[in-house]
Image (spheres, rainbow, N blue to C red):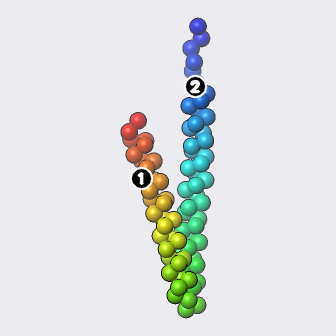
Amino acid sequence: MIATLVQGKELWQTVVASVVAGVGITFAFSVAIWGIGQFAELTRNERPLGAAVAAVVASLALTGVAGAVIFAIIVMTSK
């Protein structure tokens, strides 16, 4: 019998999860940066409603990034 050194299914799941997490968190952080920039721009142009919407988008995106980081730390420490 030949021992299995690398289990292909688990390796594939790890690769897919890390790519999805990397792209997802990067996208969410870029949305947060965009929201902060739009907030500053709309505030300067005296458009309070648009600035408020941009601030909410930025806040939601930053919350999502923070949640993903916390989830990742919990997963890493529980194994």
- Residue 44 makes an appearance in the image: no
From what the image shows, is residue 30 above or below residue 18?
Answer: below
Q: Which residue sits at x=48%, y=60%?
A: 64
Mark 1 is on which residue type?
Ile
For the residues labelled 2 and 1, the Cα–Cα distance comes to: 28 Å
Residue 50 at x, y = what percent? 56, 83
Residue 24 at x, y = what percent? 58, 55
The answer to whether the residue labelled 2 contacts the one labelled 1, judged by CB atoms less than 8 Å apart, is no
Residue positioned most to the bottom: 46
Residue 34 at x, y = what percent? 59, 72
Describe the element under mark 2 as helix, strand or loop: loop
Nearest the viewer among 52 and 69 is 52
Mark 2 is on which residue type?
Gln
Describe the element under mark 1 as helix, strand or loop: helix
Determine whether, in the image, residue 70 is placed left or right of residue 9.
left
**Residue density around tag 2, few if under 14, some if 14–19, many if 20 or more, within 10 Å:** few
Residue 71 at x, y = what percent? 43, 50
From what the image shows, is residue 57 above or below residue 48?
Answer: above
- Residue 73 makes an appearance in the image: yes
Position of the N terminus by quadrant: top right
**Residue density around tag 1, few if under 14, some if 14–19, many if 20 or more, within 10 Å:** few
Q: Which residue sits at x=53%, y=85%?
A: 49
Give the number of the disc on residue 47. Answer: none
Q: How many numbered marks appear?
A: 2
Q: Which residue sits at x=50%, y=76%?
A: 55
Quarter residue 29 falls in:
bottom right
Position of the C terminus by quadrant: top left
Q: Earlier in the sequence, mark 2 or mark 1?
A: 2
Q: Which residue sits at x=59%, y=11%?
A: 2
- Label 1: which residue? 70
- Label 2: which residue? 7
